[in-house]
Each structure stands twice: as structure tokens, then as C-alpha cells.
Amino acid sequence: MTQIIVLPHVELCPDGTVLDVAEGTTICDGLLENGIEIEHACEKSCACTTCHVIVREGFSSLSEAEEEEEDLLDKAWGLEPQSRLSCQAVVRKEPLVIEIPRYTINMAREGKH
């Protein structure tokens, strides 16, 4: 099991939390399996940026980002050098500290179908 420390997020995880997730799981699946309802508007198919997270510690231990993910990340709100789409970032052995940005860009939710 790999430890993911989730920093406090006003709506999804106000107090922050520590999760144990299986190695080989995506960050998104690990969050969802532990009751943290991170947005994933494209159903985890790497077609939006709603599951964007910032990896504060352990970034280099994650699976490499594919070109498609890199291109999408350019559109994410609050992009930082350690940003990843949580549906694509596969957890390895090293513990992670992640931050879920306060805002996402979700066109369907904002009524801009």
C-alpha cells in the first residue's frame, strides 16, 4: 500500500486526510475509493481536466505523463509544474502529498455544453 496525504480542500476534504491505496492505482481511483469525490467529468478517459491535482511531494515516483495528458494540462485551472491529471497518474511505492485545486474547468457543469 502507498500512502497519499491529501491536503485540506474546502469542499471535498476540509480537514485533509491520509489514504492507503494499492500500488498501480491511479490517484483518481484512490481518492474515489476512499470517499473523496474528485470531479472526473470524462469518466477518467483523459479528455478533460476536472481531476487535475498538484503533487506537492513524490511527483517523480508517478508514472510518466503521456503527450495527451500534457496537452490537456495546459488547459487546467491553476496549472503548476507538478500538476497531473489524477486519472492518469499511477501510484507507485513512494508516498505522495497532493493538493486538489479549489477550482476546475468543467464546461458541462457550468452550462456551456
Image: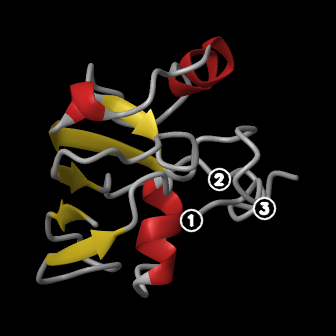
Where residue 73 appears, as percent x and y from the top left, is: 52, 26
Residue kind at label 2, given as amino acid type: Asn
Q: What residue is pinned by disc 3?
A: 111
- State yes or no: discs 1 and 2 in contact (Cβ < 8 Å): yes
Q: CA distance from mark 1 to mark 3?
A: 16 Å
Instruction: For marks 1 and 2, give the one nearer the viewer.
Output: 1
Residue kind at label 3, given as amino acid type: Gly
Q: CA distance from mark 3 to mark 2?
A: 9 Å
**SS at badge 1:** loop
- State yes or no: discs 3 and 2 in contact (Cβ < 8 Å): no
Instruction: Tell which residue pokes out farthest to the bottom in this image.
Output: 35
Residue 73 left/right relative to 20: right
Tell me which residue sits at (50%, 22%) in the image: 65
Tell me which residue sits at (24%, 75%) in the image: 19
Question: Local crowd at mark 3 within 10 Å, few (<14), some, or many (≥20)?
Answer: few
Point out the image quarter for the N terminus.
Answer: bottom left
Residue 49 numbered tag: none
Tell me which residue sits at (23%, 53%) in the image: 99
Residue 106 numbered tag: 2
Question: Local crowd at mark 1 within 10 Å, few (<14), some, or many (≥20)?
Answer: some
Image quadrant where residue 72 sits:
top right
Residue 39 numbered tag: 1
